[in-house]
Image: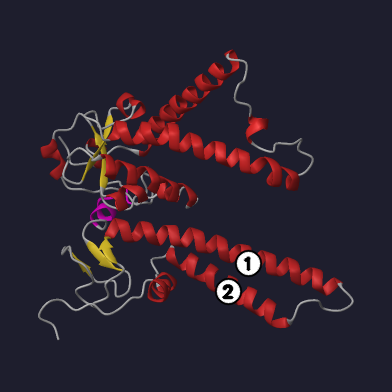
Amino acid sequence: MSGQPSDVYASFSRRAFARLLDSGFVLSVCGFLYLVNLLLGFPIKYSTLFDARAVTSIDSFMYFNFPGVALTFIAIKLLVAYPYFALMESSSRQATLGKLAMEIKVTDLNNERLSFGRATGRYFLKAISTTLLMLGYLVSFSDKRQTWHDYIAKTLVVRNNILPTFYELPRISSRWLFDLPGFGSSQNAELSQTGYICIFCHYRSNEKRFGCPHCGRPFGYGEVGAMKGIQLVHGVIFTMMGGALLFVGTKILVSELRLPYPMAPWWVFAVIFVSGGLFAAGGLSSFFGRSWLLGLLLVLFARNQPYSTPGQG
């Protein structure tokens, strides 16, 4: 058996089809509950639970209808989806119905069955993977094809017909969960995904530890795949943020120029354009392996302090 990731770790397509099947199951449960409510003559009515009114504008929808829609969605997630995913992924099957159909399962990093607590944490971490423009799902955050929530929860999604001994095969994957041309499909690119790297000093090592052994910083040192995944997500988000700021700033400035006298002080436009340019430049540079903006954000918000290993002064 070869050591390719498709032989061990679940592919993006398998995980996507499994999620589609699981979503269908959750919706079928909701449909069944609605049917029961219908047959009983609607003892539970939406209009009696929430202040629902006829939609006349987006403002009226957001004020009267959206709270009810949001609470209904949250109730489905907590009362139907959460127990389904957490209980089944922590069961002896280690998989939901969709994963069973696609012949994949969830394990911890030691090929062990998940506890209910870890399965719970993994489920709620999916919300962050979703809100990150779905990049938490699409980007491989390690050489084990982990999504963002897998990486944080320390879990793996693997083919269930693979013997545990094969989990020790070379763990190589592309930057993305699906093998796009140009994103690690060559052997050299695959090899470049292994080991650990520091985004500050770009030091490469095979040593797994807390903090960079070269520059001593406690954050920004991790698996090559994880660091590249974070860098890619950072690049997309900040490029979009910078582009949005520049677009909004330009639109406001054009409107200002059409007025007989200016409404906003000059420094407002300076802040908008400087921030937009900084974010756009930092985001775009991430696609070329630069991490100056990401490093700056870590220094500012992660309380980055020099890390000294035992024995160092």
Is 148 positioned to the left or the right of 2 in the image? right
Residue type (three-letter) at the residue carrying disc 2:
Ser
Is 300 positioned to the left or the right of 32 in the image? left
Q: Is 190 covered by the magenta stretch?
A: yes
In the foreground, 16 or 117: 117
Q: Is 103 covered by the magenta stretch?
A: no
Q: Are marks 1 and 2 in contact (CB under 8 Å)?
A: yes
Q: In which quarter of the image is residue 101?
A: top left
Q: Position of residue 144 (x, y in %)?
A: 25, 47
Label 1 environment density (alpha carbons within 10 Å; few <14, some 14–19, many ≥20): many
Image quarter hosting the N terminus = top left
The residue wearing badge 1 is 245
Element at label 2: helix
Q: Which residue does the image show at 13% across and 37% down from the upper left?
A: 164
In the foreground, 94 or 18: 94
Q: Position of residue 18 (x, y in %)?
A: 38, 30
Q: Which residue does the image show at 54% across and 37% down from the upper left?
A: 73
Q: Position of residue 279 (x, y in %)?
A: 53, 69
| Magenta stretch, residue numbers | 184-191
Q: Which residue does the image show at 74% across and 36% down from the upper left?
A: 53
Tell me: residue 233, above or below residue 174.
Answer: below
The residue wearing badge 2 is 275
Image quarter hosting the C terminus = bottom left
Farthest right residue?
260
Q: Where is residue 104 in the image (x, y as percent from the top left)?
A: 28, 31
Tell me: residue 36, above or below residue 152.
Answer: above
Is 5 positioned to the left or the right of 141 in the image? left
Ranked by sequence position, the earlier of labels 1 and 2 is 1
In the foreground, 182 or 217: 217
**Dominant secondary-structure state across the stretch colored magenta:** helix
Residue type (three-letter) at the residue carrying disc 1:
Leu
